[in-house]
Image (cartoon, rainbow, N blue to C red):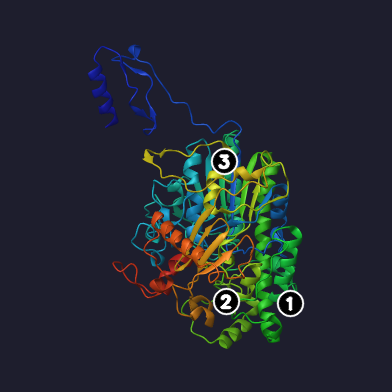
């Protein structure tokens, strides 16, 4: 067809000379600028210049951890050792007022596109059971919302992703495709990892590029790290001066918590004092490090979390072991990150690399229930609390091992890991669900090493920050498709000005009923109780759409004092703002956990139970 088109054009030109300035070459991206005549002698060749990144543009590495919690890592006051993250933070900047969406898929969609999750169709998930047939909810990121990988690749970067992806529709996640919503269809030259939300770390549902592959039996974090290093080395050998973008997103520390005893035994006995003492110690460390204000007050223990010292001895032993494994898992993950960072240093690339570390895509997980989990699905297990405790005690030696295929710590440790905040993952109303640590490392661009930044920011801000620091403009089109406006606000203004006023002043949050709206330090929030995860009585309370709370975060860092009764006009103003944001970003209709569990969405599809549907989100490599 292309040849016939060329001949027809040549015929129209006749013996004269024809300039085809309007005809595209190279997939329609570059108008032809040569001359086409009837003969070669009458013609002039033209080749477009290869696309190159801006001179001196850095390599870019995004590191996204999973379900960690604000107060877990030593980098932000925690007692769990993360030496390489500490090093990056001490040579870079700690952002203490950074936020995610409160759950994994919306955070990842927002991060990759620089746009709010509902705006890119991922208010929920890309999993069939957790998506719905509406523009904000279908889980299919549109082509007009290009990813960071698409933008950087069009501007002279190689692009690699390893680990958890999480925004490929279940219906597309087979070797038959279609592949346009796989990572390689969204701008990544190579991908190695898993497409779902959770997988067995020793028998992962593993994908390389556009096909499922057999895992080799090693821990997934080790495999993805090897692959990331190999991608970098191959690229630097072929094109030493070409920058790369690496999206490094391990499954850690999402369930299942699986790690060798070499790592978990590092923490033997370290948590015997329990979650109450843990919170107090971490809170004090955070104040000492300047992570939280000196006047902040630690909130009371969450409802239905039992006082540690009143637990029976066997429960304390059980729960401490869960936390030892989790801590070892986080330190092991830090060690794998160090392999990437140290390799960049060895090949003389680290000084020219911009690194963002998001320590969690939401708050610490509440999916371990009140008593922890080892190998039973969190949905559909009908047992009393004492039966769960007895079952876990009978398998205490399996916690963290390859047989711990659902391994997750109990709820008390989730609040502890979220110190100094209340509540946890999924709670879009709470800072405990939405606030995560952020580290920015950029030797060429950061003057104050080890500085702390308190400007309010959100996950959608990472992409525009990356573009500004690499000298790349947001494109009007990608592959001929007009692009939507990027909604995030670059953080570059704050990098060398600790006192700069916040640029990101308004942000909505919504996860399956839980919601909040932030503006200029004020925050209105509405919880959505759900007991299917926690099993606690507080979460079983009926939903009350009028039970909004109001907080002044400028004065009340940890959301302790509800001001809804004192300032009803401010609450009314913020509630109206939330509705405006919901309309603007296609969040309507409000879909809740009740809608999911009562089968009110996907009415036109083959109906499956929540237990069956979630197998697509959490499958391992031996459950295809």
Q: Which residue matches tag 1?
A: 272
Q: Is residue 621 visible?
A: no
Give the alpha-carbon distance from disc 2 to disc 1, as whole Å: 19 Å
Q: Secondary structure at mark 3?
A: strand
Task: Work out whether mark 2 precedes mark 1 in sequence or the reverse, and give the earlier one.
Answer: 1
Task: Work out whether mark 3 precedes mark 2 in sequence or the reverse, and give the earlier one.
Answer: 3
Image vertical order of residue 473 relative to residue 396, above or below:
above
- The label on residue 244 is 3
Q: Of residues 543 and 314, which is closer to you in this image?
A: 543
Q: Which residue matches tag 2?
A: 373
Q: Residue at x 41, y 57 (%)?
A: 580
In the image, taking residue 332 as reference, residue 151 lies left or right, namely left
Residue 221 in the image, given as x and y percentages of width and height = 60, 58
CB of mark 3 within 8 Å of CB of mark 2? no
Q: Secondary structure at mark 2?
A: loop
Task: Work out whether mark 3 precedes mark 1 in sequence or the reverse, and give the earlier one.
Answer: 3
Q: Nearer the viewer, mark 3 or mark 1?
A: 1
Q: Of residues 235 and 56, which is closer to you in this image?
A: 56
């Amino acid at each position: 067809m292309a040849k016939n088109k060329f001949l027809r054009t040549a015929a129209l030109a006749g013996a004269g000379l024809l300039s085809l300035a309007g005809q595209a070459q190279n997939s329609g991206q570059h108008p032809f600028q040569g001359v086409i005549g009837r003969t070669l002698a009458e013609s002039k060749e033209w080749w477009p210049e290869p696309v190159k990144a801006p001179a001196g543009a850095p390599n870019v590495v995004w590191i996204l951890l999973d379900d960690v919690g604000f107060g877990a890592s030593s980098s932000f006051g925690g007692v769990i050792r993360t030496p390489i993250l500490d090093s990056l933070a001490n040579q870079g900047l700690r952002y203490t007022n950074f936020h995610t969406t409160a759950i994994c898929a919306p955070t990842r969609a927002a991060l990759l596109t620089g746009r709010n999750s509902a705006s890119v169709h991922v208010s929920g998930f890309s999993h069939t059971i957790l998506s719905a047939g509406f523009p904000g909810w279908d889980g299919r990121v549109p082509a007009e919302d290009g990813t960071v990988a698409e933008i950087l690749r069009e501007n002279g970067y190689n692009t690699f992703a390893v680990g958890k992806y999480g925004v490929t529709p279940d219906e597309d996640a087979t070797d038959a495709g279609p592949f346009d919503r796989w990572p390689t269809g969204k701008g990544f030259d190579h991908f190695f990892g898993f497409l779902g939300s959770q997988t067995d770390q020793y028998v992962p549902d593993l994908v390389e590029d556009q096909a499922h592959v057999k895992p080799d039996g090693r821990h997934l974090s080790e495999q993805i790290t090897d692959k990331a290093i190999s991608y970098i080395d191959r690229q630097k050998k072929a094109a030493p001066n070409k920058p790369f973008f690496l999206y490094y997103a391990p499954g850690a520390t999402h369930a299942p918590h699986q790690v060798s005893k070499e790592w978990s035994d590092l923490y033997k006995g370290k948590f015997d004092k329990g979650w109450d003492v843990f919170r107090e110690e971490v809170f004090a460390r955070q104040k000492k490090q300047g992570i939280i204000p000196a006047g902040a007050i630690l909130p009371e223990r969450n409802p239905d979390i039992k006082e540690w010292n009143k637990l029976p001895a066997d429960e304390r032993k059980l729960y401490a072991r869960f936390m030892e494994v989790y801590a070892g898992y986080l330190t092991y993950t830090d060690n794998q990150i160090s392999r990437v960072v140290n390799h960049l240093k060895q090949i003389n690339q680290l000084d020219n690399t911009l690194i963002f570390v998001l320590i969690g895509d939401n708050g610490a997980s509440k999916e371990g229930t009140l008593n922890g989990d080892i190998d039973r699905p969190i949905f559909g297990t009908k047992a009393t609390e004492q039966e769960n405790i007895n079952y876990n005690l009978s398998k205490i030696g399996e916690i963290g091992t390859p047989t711990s295929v659902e391994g997750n710590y109990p709820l008390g440790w989730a609040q502890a890991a979220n110190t100094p905040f209340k509540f946890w993952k999924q709670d879009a109303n709470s800072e405990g669900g939405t606030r995560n640590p952020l580290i920015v490392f950029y030797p060429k661009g950061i003057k104050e090493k080890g500085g702390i930044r308190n400007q309010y920011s959100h996950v959608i801000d990472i992409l525009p920050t990356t573009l500004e620091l690499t000298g790349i403009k947001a494109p009007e089109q990608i592959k001929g498709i007009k692009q939507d406006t990027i909604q995030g606000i670059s953080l570059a203004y704050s990098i060398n000005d600790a006192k700069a006023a916040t640029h990101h002043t308004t942000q909505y949050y919504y996860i399956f009923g839980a919601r909040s709206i932030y503006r200029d330090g004020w925050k209105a929030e509405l919880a959505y109780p759900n007991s299917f995860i926690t099993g606690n009585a507080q979460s079983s309370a009926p939903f009350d759409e009028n039970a909004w709370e109001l907080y002044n975060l400028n004065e009340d860092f940890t959301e302790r004092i509800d001001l809804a009764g004192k300032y009803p006009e401010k609450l009314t103003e913020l509630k109206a703002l939330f509705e405006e944001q919901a309309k603007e970003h296609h969040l309507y209709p409000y879909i809740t956990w009740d809608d999911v569990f009562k089968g009110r969405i996907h009415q036109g599809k083959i109906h499956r139970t929540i237990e069956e549907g979630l197998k697509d989100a959490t499958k391992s490599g031996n459950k295809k």
